[in-house]
Image (cartoon, coloured by chain):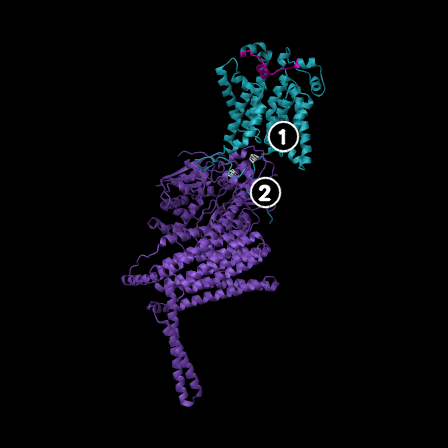
Amino acid sequence: MSLIRMSSPHVYKANSTANVMRLVLLATLPGIIALTVFFGWGTLIQIAWAGLLAVTLEAAILKLRKRPIGFYLRDGSALVTALLLAVAIPPFAPWWVTGVGVIVAIAIAKHLYGGLGQNPFNPAMVAYALLLISFPVEMTRWSAPFVLNGDGWQIASFTDTLAAIFGSVETVWYDSFTGATPLDELRHRGGLTNEEAWRQSRVLSEGIGAWHAVSAAWLMGGVFLLYRKIITWHAPISMLLALAICSAMFYGYDPDNYAGPFFHLSTGATMLAAFFIITDPVSSATSNRGRIIFGAGIGVLIFIIRTWGNYPDGVAFAVLLMNLAAPFIDLYSQPRSYGHQKANKGQGGKA
Amino acid sequence: MGKVFAFHGGIHPPENKKQSTRTPIRPVPLPKRLYLPLQQHIGMASSPVVDVGQQVLKGQLIAEPVSRISAGLHAPTSGTVVSIGPHPVPHASGLDSDCICIESDGRDQWIEHQGLGDYTRLEPAELIDHIRQCGIAGMGGAGFPTDVKLHLGDDHIVNTLIINAAECEPYITADDMLMRERADEILGGIRIISHLLKPSHVIIGVEDNKPQAIHALEAALKGCELNIDIRVVPTKYPSGGERQLIKLLTGLEVPSGGIPADIGIVCQNPGTVRAVYRAVTFGEPLISRIVTVTGDAVAQPQNLEALIGTPFGDLLDAAHVYENKLYRLVMGGPMMGVTVEHDQIPVIKTSNCIIAASIDEMPPAPPEQPCIRCGMCEQVCPAELLPQQLYWFAKGREFDKAKQHNLFDCIECGACAYVCPSSIPLVQYYRFAKSEIRTEEAEQRKSDHARARFEARQARLEREKAEKEERRKARAEEAARSQKVRKSAESSGVATEPTQDISALKTAAAVARTKLKKAQKALDAARDSGDGDIPALEAAVQAAHTSAEQAQQALEKAEGVKPTAANIDTKQLKTAAAVARTKLKKAQKALDAARDSGEGDLSALEAALKAAQASADQAQQAFEQAESGAAAGTTGPDLKQLKTAAAVARTKLKKARDALKNAEDKGLEGLDKLRATVTTLEQKAEEADKAYKDAEASAGATEAPVNQPVPVDLKALKQQVSIMRTKIKKAETALAGLEGEARSQAEQALEELRQRHAEADKAFKSAEQAQLDAAAAQGVDLKQLKIDAAMARAAVTKLERSLAKSEANDERASLEAELAAARDKAENLNTTLKQHEPA
Ligand code: SF4
Ligand code: SF4
């Protein structure tokens, strides 16, 4: 009798990396829909374009690195990276901005470091940060929510949007469909108090609902991921709490000059970051305790950058900074193992 | 019902338990042949006490335990021993190991046996010894000899006895069915164990997926006088892990590296408890167990009561296996079980389940993908480790970090691998890392040891010179004093306190032995895993051995100073001899394996073998001497023992001869070696025979000569003998010249003379022997010492030669270490010899 010889365990949970990625993609659906509803077709076009490019690029690089292409492509991680980048950049960003972003994310931030699982930085955030620094104009020209464009569902038509991204359109068109984000407005209010800024800016007074809605959509997706146990609560909750506490403290101290916690939580990329970006397992801390520290660090950094930094939204930089700190956090956040009095600290052995 | 706590992690794999609980437990038809591995438990393998061809009865002891942590083996049915040798066994390594094969005679005839009656009236030690004699070892997991656990009450305070009936692994229902059907027997076992351990509380931990078992237990417990709780824990793997269950039931954690008894807890499995009951109540040794036979590839999944040693094939037949569907055969559960490659592998004391899985049921693991650090493994790890970190460290060979991340607290439960979305065989990585770390540590120890030894040797040489003189003086005094002491002891009949600090020496000897054991274990582990620097480890073992021997010698010497009334610990010596024999056997096996495969360092192995043989012989001799010494003082020598030894030697000889013949027939290589082996064995057999006969002959005679006062003038005797011899010669010459009647007279005279000569000769020899005995009584056996010294010298020469020959650097290093050890030993022996040789 010839029987197979294998080591235990002999059964596995039906669970695969591809499955994880599929669920993540599924969880982004509410956010994508909200973005499309409020800001037009741009998001969808960006996703399609970025996804196509990412998959092609990934295949090419895998071929160069002589890895089985089909096997690695199927894990879907390239698609997830492309999607996160595409929803983060402005919907009307020109094609080459997205293109550069995808190349940076896939080729440099991911494969140059050794591919999936080896990258110390979140690829989408590396790309985003680089784009923000290199092309500040394109990257801060966000589309205006439809409510600001008149009555009814006034969004730029699909063909116009395509043209805006892949060709060129007149500036007038651009100006009529784009605008600043609430974070921008608040940042560049020029000495006005919160209340005055609110009264002056249509984006703040009328358009902000769009951002709230999008944030709520990301939150929904996040809850789904938590429910399916794809992510754990540690990093997102601690990040949101840290951000809320910081902003509440400053808002309580000086409500005229600092935005309130609700504003911080429900605008910009806060929710997207909390549930989809900082939960990227590869570049975050590994233990539960580590993730709490990691998330809290990001929350604090986001608040600092938003409030005193040069850029309106600090998510990308905050995430990258904490990515940098993650290995260090890991060293000092080992759980206390069964049968041990206390947790081990440090790395043990030579670095 | 008390509170149930929680442990971190855990998973919920499909249970697959229903299939095998539909029918009651059924016995397996008597198999034709039974294969009984000598090692079914943790500890030393047992040593056979039957010969090939011998008839055995059901329940007869066929292999005895060889050390404290070991378990005996009994014939599961009546029949004939047809072979003792390697056979595939259920072990993760997939290697063969020694088994006793019994061909059943179909009569299933019991040996005479009976229970202990009222065990509460017995001494606990007696009761525990009975349980040990019945070969009971843990039947749930690792197979730890039960009697050892029952001794835990001696040096731990045991306040809780936990019966681990969680049975959390999918598929397995053996304990479940046992509880349903034999709850009263389990309770009986609990009573016995409680009597021994005296816990204040007994907790039976059961998972909530066994309602019928819980019911049966509750019914059995009604009116029970003990403080027993049935605690139902939620179904979650691995709640049946000893440490996890303890956490679940008590909220306490077993300290890392400790045992449950450290926190006052002892765990037992229901099967074991029942075996204890049957052993105590009916005197039945552990010869059968309940095995779950299940999986998609059998038509009737069920629980079978199988004799230990039943080949899996018989069980599968009993459950109607579909040969064509069978893809993977797992012994144990799907999470931690091991696959076996063919169906002649036997049931052992720990085989709780056999899963005959189809390919759909347990498909091959999907290919490994990169770790995405998703952390799912961490969420399920019951030991609260960081599995993915451990994986990175194992993969990158960063073992220091792995250790720092508590790799050794991993219980290899497989929960992490089960959930890993990247299908990484995490547990395999951990096993690899663990074995690598163990090897590394052993090497480190070895080099430290060698350095320490070199330094110590230098220091010692200096010291010895200085001490030599002093010792000589001291010895003279000592001798005088001991003489006096003995006299006074003899007159008063009371042993006086020995002057030297024996207990300190004893401790030293014990420490040395422990070290030796550790080294041996490392070596064994290395051999099992097949990697690691085996020769180096062997050298380490030998070094440890030497130091252990030295310590032992020192101890014996010191003890020898005690009056002869102080008995030599023959039991200890016996164990030592047995251990040495086992080692010898192991070495032999390794050598054979190496020869078969044609690879491996043959010469090193041979050297190891020789060393093992030497030590086995020494141990045996020491034992025999001690025994005969003891016998001289009290009763006759243990003839039976000697007889067995002789018989064993003969069997070995026969085997070797057969092998030789075989080899000759086939014209194989290595004939010379085999022949040499046969010759040595022949010699040994003769020796053993002689020893036996001598002992037999002297059994009657011992009383007289030995009790005579020892100081006889040897020289005078010798002279007398030689004078007599001369006279005889003269007479013979004279006789040649004589004729007729004178001749016949002369012949008579001559005859008389001869007789007298013979008598004188005998007297001389017995006197000489008496002197030797006296020396032995002082703890020094000249002959032995001489042999030892010669042997040590030979070893040194041999090592020197092979050192000169060898070129490879690391080999040289290990050889050098060995050489240093051998030289030390030789020198030591020489000094001792010189001290004791009559001036
Ligand atoms: S479950 Fe697998 S993929 Fe996820 S972190 Fe653990 S080892 Fe990596
Ligand atoms: S196999 Fe080890 S690391 Fe994995 S879950 Fe079990 S105890 Fe934790």
Marks 2 and 1 sit apart, C-alpha to C-alpha, by 44 Å
Dot 1 amino acid type: Ala
Q: Is residue B507 left or right of residue B26?
A: left
Which marked residue is nearer to the observer: mark 2 or mark 1? Answer: 1
**SS for callout 2:** loop
Quadrant of the image containing the N terminus of chain B: top left
Front in this rendered view, residue A114 or B10? A114
Which chain is home to disc 2?
A: B
Is the residue indicated by label 1 positioned so its CB lies within 8 Å of ligand 1? no
What segment is highlighted magenta in the picture? A176-194
- Chain letter for mark 1, please: A
Vertical position of residue B701 compared to residue B553: above or below: below
**Residue B630: image location, x then y, percent:** 37, 62
Q: Residue at x 50, y 30 (%)?
A: A289
Is residue B619 in view from this perspective? no
**Residue position marked by numbered label 1 in the rendering:** A109
Residue farthest to the bottom?
B740
Q: Are marks 2 and 1 on the same chain?
A: no
Does residue B645 show up? yes
Residue B820 on the magenta segment: no
Q: Quadrant of ligand 1?
A: top right
Mark 2 Cα shell of 10 Å, populated few (<14), some (14-19), many (≥20): many
Q: Crowding near pointer 1: few (<14 within 10 Å), some, many (20+)?
A: many
Q: Position of residue A305 (x, y in %)?
A: 56, 21
Q: Which residue is mark 2?
A: B358
Q: Which chain is purple?
A: B
> What element does badge 1 sit on?
helix
Chain shaded cyan? A
Front in this rendered view, residue B409 or B270: B409
